Amino acid sequence: MKFLAYIVCFLIYPLSFLVPRTKKIWTFGSYRGAFNDNSKYLFLYTLQYLPEQRVVWISLSKTTVQRVRQLGGEAYWIMSPKGIWFALRSKYWFVNTNTADILFCLSGRAQVVNLWHGLPMKKIEFGITQGELAKRYIQREFWEAFYHPACFRRPDWMVSTTDFFDDVFTKSFRIAKKQCIQTGCPRNRMLLIPKQDVQTWVNSYESEETKKLIRSLQHYDKVFVYMPTWRDSQRECFANGFDLDAFNECLKSQNAFALMKPHVETIIDTNRSFSNLLFIDGNVDMYCILPFTDVLITDYSSVLYDYILMPDKNVILFHYDYDEYVREREFIFPIKDNIVGKVVYSFTELLSVITTHNYSIDQHKRQTILEKFWGKTARPDYDASHEILKALHLLDD
């Protein structure tokens, strides 16, 4: 059935070029049909500030469609007649990964704006030369290419931040530098505005579960958030010596709490509950929650660069499998020169720095990385959503 579905997709794709598109309609989508990431924040910005513009959220998830409608937005299941119609008629597609965020076979002649999902630390897309993903992008094995056609559909516009990342994205997506717009990430608005403004946003747009979670964090002296990246060869990121019971006891002794947020691709196998840590579904949007945390624990995830936009936060880099990981994935730059935070190499070290509070960030190095990676987009008054629409000439001012 999957094979036949893709055959139909390839037959439909050329027909999508025949449908006239209109600037009066913009469509938005996100990875796996979720309502999250940069697409979400740009969509809600447009709803709020451009009420005359018709913006439509398209999703493979009927739950997502319902949620967007509850917020006052227009949304359709992609397989519905209206979902297909608006995907074909809209001139602008705003996506977080590629056209699979909506539906590849309907993207002919659409202006695809790839908002991406952060500043990569590792080589991505066509920049990858080793590991499992190289079979798709470099070796172009038949079945890899057949089942991932959206990866080969180049974006018309790519959201970037500085000249440094223009070079990264042009190589990774096989586009010209003039197609990169240095406007930053809409989701990072939550990290730049005062916490009370984030709370106002949460009250207006987030689920009751998210509101309840944020309220519960106020009862702790310190809140950690663990956000590891996905590993090509090891999907269970809590398998190698990560003792959840010991971690929970360490937190409990300090009246601290930890949010355990795996990468969306990561499979975790735990039905257990803990007093001082909570596993969060991989599709949950964390960007309105991060301001209510104090310390990020991560490894090789680009969330590091988002998190340090908040000047009062600290970082622990848990590099327990560094030697193995660098054999799997290539970094874009010398990693040790482009990270900031307390680096630990074992679970014992991790507990030690948490217990001793030995994780204060180097502010000078933080500022150096912000200037190199974020440039003007790191300013507290910067609004990436506005700048993206302005760069695409979709605003009157």
Image (cartoon, helix red, strand yellow):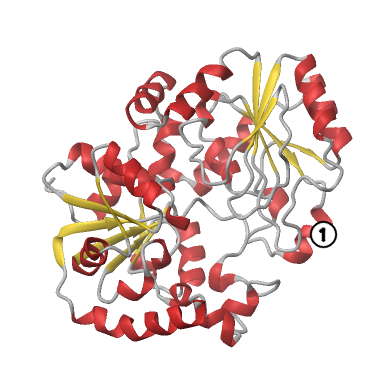
Classify residue 280 by image quadrant.
top right
Give how far across and how far down residue 70 sits, in percent: 29, 37
Q: Is residue 370 above or below residue 252?
A: below
Total numbered circles: 1
Q: Is residue 290 above or below residue 125?
A: above
Quarter that holds the C terminus:
top left
Q: What amino acid does circle 1 point to?
A: Glu
**Nearer the observer, 141 or 312:** 141
- Residue 386, can we see it? yes
Give how far across and how far down residue 22 sits, in percent: 14, 65
Give how far across and how far down residue 213 sits, in percent: 53, 24
Give how far across and how far down residue 338 sits, in percent: 65, 48
**Nearer the observer, 55 or 153:** 55
Classify residue 382 by image quadrant.
top left
- Residue 184, can we see it? no
**Nearer the observer, 250 or 119:** 250
Q: Residues within 10 Å of mark 1 (few under 14, many from 20)?
A: few
Compared across the picture, whether 182 is left or right of 307 comes to left
Give the structural element (helix, strand or loop) at label 1. Answer: helix
Residue at left offset 50%, top offset 78%: 1
Residue at left offset 70%, top offset 47%: 268
Label 1: which residue? 324
